[in-house]
Image (cartoon, rainbow, N blue to C red):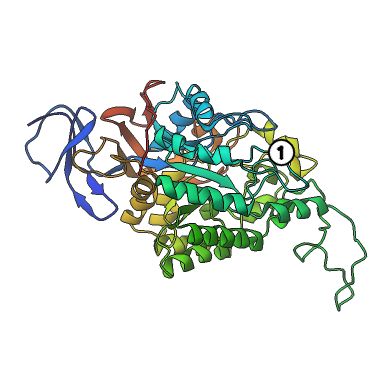
Amino acid sequence: MNFDLVVRGGTLVTADAVFPADVGIIGDKIAAVVAPATPMGAVQTLDATGCYVLPGAIDAHVHLHMPTAVGYTADDWRTGTTAAALGGTTTLVDFVETQPTETLLDALHKRLDETHDAVIDFGLHMTLQPDEHPIQGIPRRISAGRISQIREAYDAGCATFKMYQAYPGFQVQDADLLRALFAIREVGGMACIHSENGDVIEVLRGRAGQEDDGRPTTDDGMNDSSSVVGRPSSLPLSSAYQHALTRPPANEHESVTRAVMCAEISGARVLIFHIGCAAAAQVVAEARARGLAGVYGETCPQYLVLTDAQLQRDDGRLWICAPPLRPQADQDAIWNRLASRALDFISTDHCPFTRQQKDAGRDDFRLTPGGVPGIEARLGLVHHFGVRAGRLSLSDWVRLCCTRPAELHALHGKGRIAVGFDADLVIFDPALRKSLSAGQLHSAIDWSAYEGMTCEGWPREVLSRGEVIVRAGQFMGQAGRGRFLHRAF
């Protein structure tokens, strides 16, 4: 058999095994996985000697060209997908966000019109948010008409539906969350939930920066308002650490508990997005232990590499994201949950803003747009701080960054090195060192969340559907080659 391209001499890393093998590609598919040095005629050959060969990584949670109060997120579909490719990601999943007067299908078509410059394949989550005005003091609701559109959105290729338990304008009340979960279960989809208690957050944010309110002092004669959650903090509003104080771990824990309860009642599959604290991860682990196989958990590199110490810097607003960065003990717990498979995979929640955009919160942390970049660094970070540090095996790494996200997001034909699967491959050089400074990365922002860090191990070549789009660390692809992936479970 003659092949269009053969990858020779590498060590294949899959979610199940690590072994030497060669890979033959015909067109855009993997056509053979054979023992090393098996005779294979090829138009083109890539030498992967000394490197790992893994499935193209999948980032199932990114925000490209997303409208916010400070303008669009800094990466558009060209810059964001290019940065992703250079970091070894060959598929991503972004979002459709609907306006109150739009149908889900109208919003999907409008979003697709913005994706023409994508250089890698992509899917879209459909966001379900309130579309009805408040009635007699009741918060905004998701109308029955909006919920009835879930079937159409699913049939149009949006197999996953996002809901927020926080943020005014986006926050879904428990009744609507449950109603939507019943509808999502009926069509066979999956819900993805941002789990923080928005009502509590708004109260705490309103109290932030207040002076002593006359509450009783502690036994030692000192007012404990700066150390007890819910009390006003003595920190100024310019302190980014206020962000962590107004979104405490107990808040995330409670919200995840409610989301899991709704999943159990409805029978719907539910993925908890960006888990950042030990208590929230424990809720998911306990749900799985008692047999709720349809409850899943995602975390992100920022919760694995950074801590709340970043928020105490003078420029700590750069690291404001939600949920906030947590202490070291939470980070250690999240690593352990990944290794034990209580959490399913790692996405980035890539939400990039420039320094100027982040400076909207220079004097008041509440005005800072929330989000950190990471679309290019994820695969290298998890290898360096996970595999090299002994926290994860090589197969864990691939399972968390490639295979499991494909399985859970209905990305059929992605995430594995097997005959008939898309020829999305990464030739990863474990000895290649990569600085994560802003000048060495390709997101359209002027800072790096991981400034000063160096990864040992980085993608050298990247293939998307059989095409070499990164060669020797240089981007070779073309804008517009990315395809919308019609997903269905």
Query: Residue at the location (45% across, 63% down)?
Result: 337
User: In the image, is 316 to the left or to the right of 150?
Assistant: right
- Residue 99 is situated, as x and y percent measured from the top left of the image, at 62, 31
**Would residue 327 be seen by someone viewing this image from the given angle?**
no
- Residue 90 is situated, as x and y percent measured from the top left of the image, at 37, 35
Query: Residue at the location (49% across, 57% down)?
Result: 266
Residue highlighted by disc 1: 133
- Residue 9 is situated, as x and y percent measured from the top left of the image, at 18, 42
Q: Residue furthest bottom?
A: 219
Vertical side of 1 occupied by 385: above or below: below
For this rendering, which residue is in front, 458 or 206?
206
For the image, the number of numbered tags is 1
For this rendering, which residue is in front, 350 or 144?
144
Is the N terminus in the top left, top right, bottom left or bottom right quadrant? top left
Element type at marker 1? Answer: loop
Label 1 crowd bin: few (<14), some (14–19), many (20+), radius 10 Å? some
